[in-house]
Image (cartoon, coloured by chain):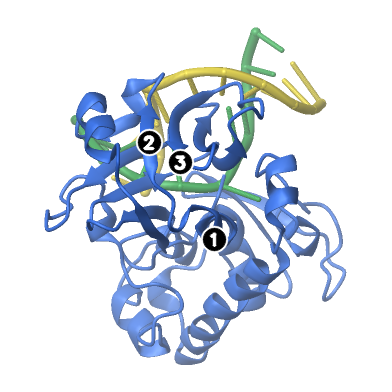
Chain colours: A blue, B yellow, C green
Amino acid sequence: MPELPEVETIKRVLEPQLRGCMIQSVKVPRPEVIAHPDAADFCAALAGQKIRGMDRRGKFLQIIMESGDTVILHLRMTGCLLAAPKDHPAEKHTHVVFCLDNDVEVRFSDTRRFGRLWLQHAGEADTFSGRELLGPEPFDEGMTAEYLQSALGKSRRTIKACLLDQKKIAGIGNIYSDEILFSAKIRPDREACSLKKKEWERLAETIPASLSFFIEKNRITPAAYLKSKGQDYRNTPFLKVYGHEGEPCPTCGTPLRKNVIGGRSSVFCPKCQK
DNA sequence: CGGCCCCTGACG
DNA sequence: CGTCAGGGGCCG
């Protein structure tokens, strides 16, 4: 489920807990979630390493070692990363456990098992995770109306599909694409090549503004994050269209509509969004 | 592009 | 029982 705001939230919650800790051992009850290298090498390479910090790129999380070796993690739909005291009960679908030197465990769990982990050695090119293929971050300087128009503006794909294309912009998923398009007053099924300059300008403004708004609304303490098992998406009450099909548009009162666009359900206001 | 695949669980 | 889920890869 996590999109950029949730992944950023996880990074902000966990990084202070992980930074400076040493990984004593790694256990992998579900080796298939380790996509690179194989699970035995993954565990062996990380044992004894000290954690320098965490980072996020699009929807990817990274746990960076002092050596420069980096664990890359993608949560996909139901992946979850929790830091818990080692005697705290583990989630049902726990597939990877990093045992730290302070009796804390960092646990990756994932009901649907779509999530993946990779280990990138220091100096090694990441040709395996797909992270190198990502487009710019929504908060990059270069995320301008000019960039969006040049990167997307020739396409006959829907603007919704373009916003979901991680090669064009990193981190936007199905919920926030709907929220961004509502804020920008653009219908999700518009062909990208039909957008006008003013609309690219509105998108350039609403993409970072909307995502940072929802990151702020997600703020949570480490204790509450652990207690809710990472599932307390406290920005949900602030979603204006996603999950609100049939309800009145918060701006004009027209019932919000839900269409399938590019295989993903999309909610929008048929009056406000042109 | 659409369609199917990877999986489990919640809901109607 | 079928459908859907805030992701993404692959295939024709």
Q: Position of residue A181 (x, y in %)?
A: 59, 70
Image quadrant of residue A219?
bottom right
Q: Nearer the viewer, residue A41 or A209?
A: A41
Q: Residue at point 39% right, 72% down?
A: A137
In the rendered structure, the answer to whether residue A70 lies left or right of residue A17 reads left
Q: Residues within 10 Å of mark 1 (few under 14, many from 20)?
A: few
The Cα–Cα distance between marks 2 and 1, rounded to whole angstroms, is: 18 Å
The Cα–Cα distance between marks 1 and 3, rounded to whole angstroms, is: 15 Å
**Element at badge 2?**
strand
Q: Nearer the viewer, residue A257 or B7?
A: B7
Q: Is residue A113 visible?
A: no
Q: Residue at point 44% right, 51% down?
A: A21
Contact between marks 1 and 3 (CB within 8 A): the answer is: no
Q: Residue at point 87% right, 69% down?
A: A253
- Nearer the camera: disc 2 or disc 1: 2
Label 3 vs 2, first from the N-terminus = 2
Amino acid residing under circle 1: Pro
Q: Residues within 10 Å of mark 3 (few under 14, many from 20)?
A: some
Residue identifier under label 3: A101
Q: Which quadrant is home to the C terminus of chain A?
A: bottom right
In the rendered image, the residue lying farthest to the left is A124
Residue identifier under label 1: A16
